[in-house]
Structures are given as C-alpha cells and as structure tokens.
Image: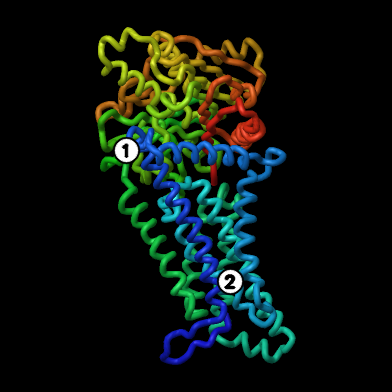
C-alpha cells in the first residue's frame, strides 16, 4: 500500500483506518454474540437441573427451539449438490459488511489503499480461525468443519480485496509507463507484489482436489502464508498492528495441538473386508476424556510423515475414568492415504504413530439423548457408521450401567426413559461391508430385546447394490467382524489385550437387511412423536436428510432436532 513511512516518528494515522476498524468491529461483534450464546448453552447443558425451571433455563430452551427451526430451514441445499442456504447467507452477510466499507466515500482509482486496509482487517480473523483448536472455534463452539468453511470464505474475501488494491494501483500507474517503471523499482512495491503472489499460491493450494488428493502440496503452499505475512509487514508499517492478535491466536493453536493434544503411540492394525482397517492405538501418555462424535488426527510416518487425517473415535469411554490409555478408530479405504493403510499395513506387527486430539464438540451425551426425545434416529451411510456405532455403544453402555446400579425396586419397572424407541439405520453399497459391524449389531439387538427396561431397538440395514440370492448366502458365511471396545459391552483394550483380534458376540438376534433400496429420509423421520436424529455419511446422504427436515419443518406436527456429522477435506 502506498503509505508515507515517516522517519523516526510513529506511523501517522491514515484516512482508511476507520473503515478497517469498522470491519473488525462488525466481525468481532458477531464472534462475541456467538461466544455468549455458546457459554449460555454450555452452562445450561452442564447444569440443566439448576437452570431447568428458572427463567434463564426457559429462555435458553425457547431460544434453542427457535435456533433449531432456523438451522433446519437454512440447511436446505438447492438441487442436492449446492452448498446449503446458510452458507449463502453467511457469504452474503460478509459481502454486505465489506462492500459498503470498500466503496463508501472513496474513488478506488485514486485511493486503492482502502481495499488494502480491509485486507489487513481480515487477516487476524483468518489466522484465529486456522487449525483444529482455533481461537474462534474455542470461543464460539462452532465445529471445525463449519469453521473451515468460514476460514475459506475469509480467505476468498482477502484475495478479492488484495486484487482490488493491486489492480487499481497498477492501472493508475500504467497510464504513465516511465512512472510505473520507477515505482516497480521501489522495494515496498516489490514486497507488496511478492506478498500478493504468495497469497495467490496459497489460494490455489486450497482447492478441493489439492486438499483431497495431494495433501503435501496443500501443506507446503499454506506455509507461504507465513511468507505473505512477513512480506506485507515490510510492505506497509500499518500491518503488524493488525497481524499481532491473529498471530497470537495462531500461536496458541499450535501450542495446544503440539504440546497439549499430541501423543506418541503404538498402533495395531486389523484388516477387515471391503477396505476397512480397525486401528487399536496404545497411547504413550493418557488422553483426556473423549465424547461421542469426537475425532483424532492420525499420522502414520510409515506412510507419510506429513499427512494428518481425521478419524472418528469408535471406542466407548471408560466409566469413571478421567483419562484414556488407548483408543480405537476404523479407517475406510476411500482416498490415497486410507487406501495405503489398508494395502500396506502388516496386521502382524504394530507401528509407531502420532495422535492429536480429541477434537470436536462434547455436547452429545448418552444420558441427554435418552432423556430429551421420545424417538432417537441414528442414520449412517458407508464410513459414517463409525459415528453411529460409537453413539449406539454409548447408549447401550449407559443403559447397562444405570441398570446395574439402580435399586432392586426399579428393576421391576418397565422402561422409564423418555426415549421409547431407537431406530438404527446403516446404508452400504456392497453386502460384504455389513460384516464390519453386523455381528456386534446382532448382539446389541439381543441385549435390547432381552431387557424390558431398555428402549425398543430397531436395526435396519440397507445394501444399495442388488445381489443374487447365491452371492448373499455365500457372503453370509464369512466370519469377519470387528473387535470394538466398550467398558460394559465388551472388553476395553488394555496392555495385555491390545492386539486381540475378534470378539465373539453371543447370543445374537438377527437384524433386518434390505437389498437394492436406498434409505428414504422422509420415511425415516416421519414419527408422530418428537425425534432427535443423528446423521453421518457422505455429502449427498447428509443433504437428503437436511433437505427433508427443511421441507417438513413448516408442519407444526413435525418436531425433529437434527444433528449431522459431515465429512470434510
């Protein structure tokens, strides 16, 4: 930016600074509102018995109902492939905040620095929204996937403003070739152009194909972001006053990830049919308690020393234990990294790995699920079964623990939980994929069936591909299954049994399997009572449920609280 540096005096005020400060105020105000919202919901969730009947408790309950209604509405994705309406709304809100500040009381041909100052105002929020433990995510409780979307939107706003700043500046110089040539010789201009080039490379490295298929390139291009900050700090003396807060937040994220939440571990691999790898991980130091839906980032140096990939924790939390010594994840061969895990790992020996986490929301608690709605729907597609199984195991574990600790008089009573029915759906492409969890599901089906104090469990498995009867019977004879850990359901992984392979689930009760049909979200969610639905699967799978909820939420009789776990790169 074309600023006067001054000699030994402090950097003088600039006419564009108030507009940059206004943008900071707008974005910071939104973050502050979301932070207050997160705190109220968190404390209401933690101290429900205290707040439940108070005025504050009733207000929060009504607010959450209203918020759930609008979230359901704006989760609708046009044509089933476009981003949800909420994403368009957030993008429009950012544009409506930046555009007036960019164009108000200015001729960009004469003062393109206005766009440059807006760039400086965006950078601290871009840095503070970076990473799994970003400051903005911590304050607002927004999931890392949604935060990544906001991070990319801010990145696009940054490159647009930087392009406006540079293009108007160069356009005004181009009318006078000799003057432009002299300007290009100035160090400050050269630093600015170099910084813009670095920013362009970072943006190109952020595209989905790069993130998905060439993670090393994605990582290396993002390292140029640090170079961008250094070049712009030299380009203009106004930069660091904006960058410092963002750099501080980013440094906290690095400290949290590398020195607090990263562990060395030993991993053992169990190869299952159709590209599934169960990984049992023995941690070198205990991990903090993890919750339903949380995930870890896993690095296997034997495959790549630079790639970290997220995987949902499938092992059940040990009862009355603050820290965990071991965890378990299931890896489905869907991309280059996961395919390498399935093809190259030797199941006969362990490998050193690095684990970072746990990450994600801690709001899903089994006891709350059983007491908040009459019907619970767990719908998963493909690899999304990892989330669904963790939730079903936690529900089972909670029910068994409560049943064992309740009074003898209560044991004679029928189901006293608010939840009367649990509907579990899993859709896969091929029949053999069911063997990842089929035996365990049959065992859990028996557990619920044999205990009248438990809610009714309805398990329905769908195979979208059509098979002949002979091929189905042939695949039914396979005896592959997973060996997942639970403090009450099955043995938790300990130092003596970490390499244990298959667990015999007995007795069992058969589950319903349907071939050649996809799950129909409208049918699944059509219950006469209030429903709490948990959905996890590929993008199209989740969109079908979001669109169904958005379409049906206008009916007064439709009362669904939807929680979607999304895949992301």
- Farthest front residue in view: 55
Q: How is the image coloured?
A: rainbow
Image depth: mark 1 or mark 2 in front = 1
Q: Horizontally, is 551 left or right of 225 in the view?
A: right
Q: Nearer the viewer, residue 536 or 506?
A: 536
Which of the two discs, 1 and 2, labels the residue nearer the N terminus?
2
- Farthest right residue in view: 175
* Residue 290, quarter of the rendered image: top left
The percent position of residue 554, horizontal first and vertical second, equals 65, 33
Q: Which residue is mark 1?
A: 289
The percent position of residue 305, horizontal first and vertical second, equals 42, 50
Q: Is residue 340 visible?
A: yes
- SS type, badge 2: helix
The percent position of residue 400, horizontal first and vertical second, equals 33, 18
Residue 196 shows which numbered tag? 2
Residue at position x 66%, y 88% in the image: 181
- SS type, badge 1: loop
Q: Is residue 1 above or below residue 92?
A: below
Residue at position x 61%, y 16% in the image: 514
The percent position of residue 492, horizontal first and vertical second, equals 31, 26
* Distance (Cα) linking label 1 and label 2: 43 Å
In the picture, the quarter occupied by the N terminus is: bottom right
Crowding at dot 1, Cα within 10 Å, few <14 / some 14-19 / many 20+, comes out as few
Crowding at dot 2, Cα within 10 Å, few <14 / some 14-19 / many 20+, comes out as some
Q: How many marks?
A: 2
Residue at position x 53%, y 76% in the image: 17
């Amino acid at each position: 930016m074309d600023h006067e540096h001054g000699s030994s005096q402090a950097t003088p005020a600039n006419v564009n600074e108030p507009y940059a400060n206004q943008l900071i105020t707008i974005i910071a105000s939104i973050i502050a509102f979301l932070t207050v919202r997160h705190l109220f919901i968190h404390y209401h969730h933690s101290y429900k018995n205290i707040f439940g009947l108070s005025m504050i408790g009733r207000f929060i309950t009504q607010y959450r109902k209203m918020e759930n209604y609008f979230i359901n509405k704006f989760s609708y994705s046009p044509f089933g492939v476009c981003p949800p309406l909420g994403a368009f709304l957030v993008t429009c809100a950012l544009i409506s905040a930046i555009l007036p500040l960019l164009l108000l009381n200015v001729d960009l041909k004469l003062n393109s620095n206005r766009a440059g100052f807006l760039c400086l105002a965006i950078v601290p929020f871009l840095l503070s929204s970076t990473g799994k433990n970003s400051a903005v995510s911590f304050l607002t409780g927004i999931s890392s996937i949604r935060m990544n979307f906001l991070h990319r939107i801010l990145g696009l706003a940054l490159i647009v403003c930087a392009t406006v700043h540079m293009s108007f500046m160069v356009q005004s110089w181009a009318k006078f070739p000799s003057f432009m040539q002299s300007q290009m010789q100035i160090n400050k201009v050269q630093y600015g152009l170099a910084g813009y080039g670095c920013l362009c490379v970072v943006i190109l490295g952020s595209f989905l194909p790069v993130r998905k298929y060439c993670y090393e390139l994605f990582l290396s291009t993002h390292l140029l972001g640090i170079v961008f900050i250094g070049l712009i700090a030299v380009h203009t003396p106004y930069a660091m006053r904006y960058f410092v807060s963002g750099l501080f937040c980013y440094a906290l994220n690095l400290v949290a990830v590398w020195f607090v939440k990263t562990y060395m571990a030993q991993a053992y691999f169990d190869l299952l049919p159709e590209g599934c790898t169960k990984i049992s991980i023995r941690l070198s130091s205990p991990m903090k308690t993890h919750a339903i839906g949380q995930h870890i980032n896993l690095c296997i140096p034997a495959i790549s020393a630079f790639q970290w990939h997220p995987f949902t924790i499938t092992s059940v939390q040990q009862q009355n234990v603050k820290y965990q010594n071991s965890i378990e994840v299931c890896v489905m061969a869907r991309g280059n990294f996961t395919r390498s895990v399935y093809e190259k790992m030797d199941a006969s020996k362990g490998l050193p790995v690095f684990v970072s986490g746990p990450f994600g929301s801690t709001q899903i608690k089994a006891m709350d699920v059983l007491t908040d709605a009459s019907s619970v729907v767990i719908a998963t597609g493909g690899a999304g079964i990892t989330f669904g199984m963790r939730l079903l195991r936690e529900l089972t574990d909670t029910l068994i623990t409560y049943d064992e600790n309740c009074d003898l008089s209560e044991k004679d009573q029928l189901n006293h939980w608010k939840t009367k029915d649990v509907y579990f759906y899993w859709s896969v492409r091929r029949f053999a994929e069911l063997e990842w969890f089929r035996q365990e599901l049959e065992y859990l089906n028996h557990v619920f069936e044999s205990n009248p104090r438990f809610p009714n469990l309805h398990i329905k498995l769908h195979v979208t591909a059509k098979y002949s009867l002979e091929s189905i019977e042939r695949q039914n004879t396979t005896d592959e299954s997973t060996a997942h850990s639970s403090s009450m359901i099955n043995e938790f992984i300990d130092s003596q049994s970490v390499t244990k392979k298959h667990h015999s689930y007995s007795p069992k009760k058969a589950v319903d399997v349907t071939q050649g049909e996809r799950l129909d979200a409208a049918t699944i969610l059509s219950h006469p009572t209030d429903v709490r639905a948990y959905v996890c699967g590929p993008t199209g799978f989740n969109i079908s449920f979001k669109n169904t909820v958005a379409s049906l939420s206008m009916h007064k009789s439709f009362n669904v609280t939807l929680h979607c776990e999304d895949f992301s790169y």
